Amino acid sequence: MDDRVQAHVQDEGVQRPALGRVGRQAHAPDRGERYRELPRLDAAAAVDGAVGYGARAVATAKFECRRGEVVAVGSDVKDVKVGDKVAYSVFGSYAEYTAVPAAKCLPVPDDVPMDVAVSCVVQGLTAHYLTSDAHSQLIQPGEWMLVHGVGGGTCQWAAQMAKIRGYKVIGTCAKGKGDIGKATGVDELILYDEAPGTAYEDYESVDGLAKVLEITDGAGCKAVIDGIGKATLDMSLGSLAQRGIFVSFGNASGAVPAYPPLRHICLLYTSDAADEEDSVDLGGRRI
């Protein structure tokens, strides 16, 4: 059964391989692609079980979201035709020519730029899940949601989707990306200084937790969407309202360290005065 198509990303001078084979590495990733180098991958896989990768093909052994034009289709493909613009995400797609299962091809309408289409597949779908399902409906329209990094890719989408769903949104970003953050339409924006020599936030430059509590009149947020990781863990937890939910989906500042939930549970059996030294300080809110 041949249910694959061959997608093409323009790269001059590359000879087109046969259907099911992969060409060489493209020059640069599209906006929205995952910048994952091979050593950070857990494993390399074949495209539809047909193409193996050895030592000489490490440049293509990556899982990326790409976009391109269909240049060939298998005999069993019914819904995709040569000339279609598609976005796709499969192993080996860091190449000019890629064999892609037809079921994994997303058609791109003519009025949608290809760079927007490819960022939608990676960042947009992630943001949709974060704002619609990951919070387990513990937040309702009209309640506060904290979204970190609204000057970046995924959370630009997330902030706007959260507003569409009716949540009140507090966003955070670096001062250098303030215009981008404001353009998402968040209700409140917390701006951090950039860390020296970078475009990334210095999360020690502003007391973000104090600002969140001020904005929410001390109640906190019913949901926190955090792709920053280590640097914002305590602030995110401290920002939670009663029965709020913390959704950690990334580690831009480093991996979130192991966190013992028993530290919360044990407090049910102690008094604040007797066990102050055992309580957890989350940026000024002791729990």
Image (cartoon, helix red, strand yellow):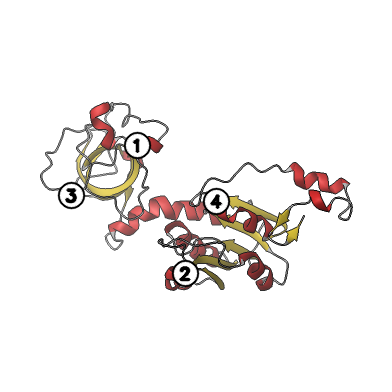
Q: Identify the amino acid type marked 4.
A: Gly
Evaluate whether residue 137 shows in this view. Answer: no
Q: Quadrant of the N terminus?
A: top left
Mark 1 vs mark 4, CA separation in Å: 22 Å
Q: Nearer the viewer, residue 47 or 69?
A: 47
Q: Position of residue 230 (x, y in %)?
A: 56, 50
**Residue 202 appears in the picture as rendered:** yes
Instruction: Indicate left or right for 228 with 41 as reference.
Output: right
* Secondary structure found at label 4: loop
Q: Name the mark nearer the viewer: 2 or 3.
A: 2
Whole-angstrom CA distance, mark 3 to mark 4, is 36 Å
Cα distance between the residues tagged 1 and 2: 32 Å
Q: Residue, x 86% and y 55% (percent of image)?
A: 272
Q: Which residue is mark 4?
A: 229
Q: Check disc 3 and report the residue beneath it.
A: 10
Q: Residue at x 21, y 43 (%)?
A: 96
Label 2 with label 4: CB-CB less than 8 Å: no
Residue to which mark 1 is pinned:
38
| Cα separation between marks 2 and 4 | 19 Å
Mark 2: amino acid: Gly
